[in-house]
Amino acid sequence: MNFIRMTVIDPMHNLFMGTTKFLFKDVWQSKHQLDKKEKLQNIQDIIDAIEVPSEMGRIPQKIASSFSSFTADQWKNWTLYYSMFAMKGHLPKQSYDVWVKFVEACHLLCRPVITNTDLSKAHENIMAFCKSFEAVYGSVLVTLNMHFHTHLIECIIDYGPVYAFWLFSFERYNGCLGSYPTNKKNIELQIMRQFHRTQYVKSEAKPVIFNDEFLSCFESLSHNQVGSLALSNCELDEQVYLSARTMIKGELTQGPLWLTTEDRIEVQGKKREGLVSGTHLTYLKESLKTFLRNINTDQVSGAFKMYQSVKYLGEIFGSTESRLRNSGNIMASWNGYDGKIDPKSELQPGKVVYFMRFFVMMKGSDKPSLIDMAYVKWLQRHSEKEFFHKDLATVWAAHSLFDPEGPSSFMPVKRIDGKYLPGHIKVKGESVTVAIKRNSKIIW
């Protein structure tokens, strides 16, 4: 028993309810006049221009009222995704650079899958943040909470990624328990009875006794998992993880792994018949030959089943054809120049128009194989790409401007790296799109 080592620091309170809230409420509002209504309203307007998918929860609407009643999850999303984009120009450069170090560290620390290299890099960023904060604001404003940042690396080494031990899940289910109707007497007994009843219905009684029309009466414990809690809900076999990582980040290895066989691609939404013809069919065949050497392209007719969304590796990716269009903003290393495929290219944001599922014939095989592809429009590159950050928030051309179509317009679903949040703003007088990279359930 080691009481010191076994006292775990909660990243939710330590990082977001602690340092993030302290900087905005107690430091910047007084030192940089961020308490002025016009500045806060300007920040709110910038945030409102970001396209946020439903699984992240609502866009914070309380910034204009001085961040009043922000939840822990909103403080987290503010730190990871909104703040670096919204605070550019509202903070002096020195203070902004201090904050960027903290955001970089949080991005790494909040990964559901984290490597030792990423953990070391996060610790370096945390130390750089603490030292630079003291240099800029003085030791008087340094808090004990900032010292606890330096021990997060030890907690993660001992107990795994922060999703294993931070308090988001605990607080979430506290809220669920508090929402149950009671008569204010013997509350514990009422909650346990309700819990037992609901679990019994789910596990045993549902297939035997009740019709579907009555099941809604027993779903009081079924709460949608959104935000931080939703990210933690993913089971993945190690071999599936390693093979998926190779296909997303590695070279375009030729082989059957690209086909839809025993992997976890689940098509969703309305199914329609689709047909690719003419130049687009030529692009599709060229794309298939890039990663399927033994494919018989003569038998690729262009007919396919069109789907609005897919679920892969625990993530749901939407398209412009579905109500989940904001979940169709994806990033991948696939698009080169002039519509050509370049697997070594930088991560580039794109919009999925629709998903395709169809059969292909491989040479030497007498059975057709299934494959899932995405038809993507890629945002154009911009000279001010690193205006905010070289990796976490990059600048691209306005959202209505796309690269020329070509073979790279058709990409296997297994190549999707993750999602991004599009923010629309003007940089040096020009309308641009800022791709704010999201942490996904699986980090490569």
Image (cartoon, helix red, strand yellow):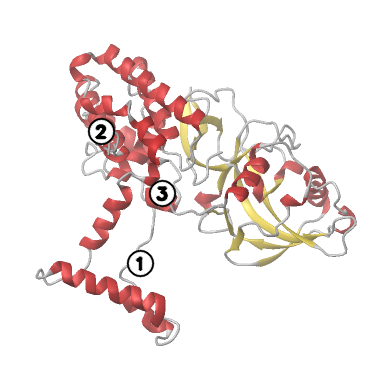
Q: Mark 1 and mark 3: span between their CA atoms?
A: 18 Å
Residue at the disc numbered 2 = 4
Q: Say if residue 46 shows up in the picture.
A: no
User: Which of the two labelled residues, at mark 2 and mark 3, occupies the earlier sequence position?
Assistant: 2
Q: Where is residue 181 in the image (x, y as percent from the top left)?
A: 19, 70
Q: Mark 2 and mark 3: span between their CA atoms?
A: 35 Å
Position above or below: 90 against 56:
above
Residue sitting at 28 percent across and 52 percent down? 170
Residue at the disc numbered 1 = 222
Residue sitting at 85 percent across and 52 percent down? 295
Residue sitting at 81 percent across and 63 percent down? 368
Q: Nearer the viewer, residue 407 or 147?
A: 147
| In the displayed structure image, the side of residue 149 where residue 100 appears, left or right | right
Q: Which of 302 and 380 is in front in this view?
A: 302
| In the displayed structure image, the side of residue 420 where residue 40 appears, left or right | left
Q: Where is residue 242 in the image (x, y as percent from the top left)?
A: 62, 44
Check disc 1 and give the amino acid type.
Answer: Ser
Disc 2 + disc 3, Cβ < 8 Å? no
Q: Position of residue 392 (x, y in %)?
A: 49, 31
Q: What element carries label 3?
A: helix
Residue at the disc numbered 3 = 56
Disc 1 + disc 2, Cβ < 8 Å? no
Residue ranking furthest to the front: 1
Closer mark to the observer between disc 1 and disc 3: 1
Which quadrant holds the N terminus?
top left
